[in-house]
Image: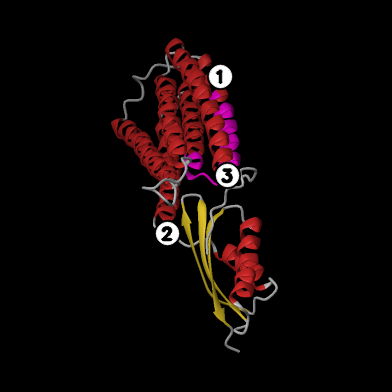
Amino acid sequence: MGTNNTNLSEPSSSDYFEAVATKVTMVSIIGNFILSAFKLLAGILAHSGAMVSDAIHSASDVFSSIIVIIGVKLSARDSDKEHPYGHERFECVAAIILSVVLLFTGLAIGAEALQNIMGGNYESLAIPGQLALIAALISIVTKEAMYWYTRINAKRIDSSALMADAWHHRSDALSSIGALIGIAGARMGFPILDPIASLIICFFIAKASLDIFKDAIDKMVDHSCDIDTENAIRRLAESQTGVMGIDFLQTRVFGNKIYVDIEISADGNLSLNEAHEIAEKAHDAIENEFPKVKHIMVHVNPYQG
């Protein structure tokens, strides 16, 4: 016996998931577009190569947000004949693409930093104007706010693609910190601070991208859900009237949904209808308590005391 969770009022419903993800992503696109234009203008007027590079980084985040929207739209599609289990894994694909983009972004920052450190020609760099400092500060505050806004909503709907986009905002904030240090250092006569800060930032970005990649891969290869959730499902099933034991429990994560296979024990002398009623109660209790559970298969075994 199994069923699909179709309660659209739950925070895990596909409609709610798509609405939240689309809203957050559109905010990201508009914010990144305005911020990148401002930083580009500030970089040109203040003669700051670091700020121009930072502006390009912000502009690339628009591309990342578009990938999120595509992934969310595809993953929110209803099940069909060719895809009876739904399309949730498209969201994982989007997260993997974003993690790779994020990794290359970090590596590019690190490579440029190493090149500048090894080059050692610091005196030839132009001294940036004060406008570049102001732009860097605005960028740090704005991108960190966008990171937390996206991260909170990603956790709310359990979206790996949205979480990856959040880390793109954080990487941009870190990049702006590097730009701020470099600009301030250049104005004080220490331009080497810029590449050193960028090199450190590279490692943080690379670590975040690998964590996002691992999480998305786990969701694509039928990884079991966390042990606390499994234990909670087990306890809930055992508490139902007529359930005498749990013989088997298996879970798998499919995108941001959970599939459950469970075998319960009941009195072997019960009629088929009575045993079915016990299984139905266990099924409904799990589905109502855990909104992320999309499908449950309950099998009833005679109790072996």
Label 3 SS: loop
Residue at position x 42%, y 51% from top? 84
Q: In screen coordinates, is 277 left or right of 253?
A: right
Other residues around mark 3 within 10 Å, as few (<14) / some (14–19) / many (≥20): some
CA separation in Å, label 1 and label 2: 47 Å
Residue at position x 42%, y 59% from top? 222
Kindly report which numbered mark, 1 or 2, lies closer to the viewer in this rendering.
2
Question: Can residue 191 be seen in this snapshot?
Answer: no
Counting residues from the N terminus, which is met first, the one under dot 3 or under dot 2? Answer: 3
The residue beneath circle 2 is: 222
Mark on residue 121? Answer: none
Amino acid tagged 2: Asp
The residue beneath circle 1 is: 134
Which of these two is toward me, 145 or 112? 145
Label 2 SS: loop
Residue at position x 41%, y 43% from top? 90
Residue at position x 61%, y 58% from top? 287
Q: Where is residue 174 drawn, in percent x and y?
A: 49, 34
CA separation in Å, label 3 and label 2: 20 Å
The residue beneath circle 3 is: 13
Q: Where is residue 80 drawn, in percent x and y?
A: 42, 45
- Tell whether position 24 is magenta: no
Residue 148 against residue 36 in the figure, above or below: below
Amino acid tagged 1: Ile
Q: Where is residue 123 drawn, in percent x and y?
A: 36, 21
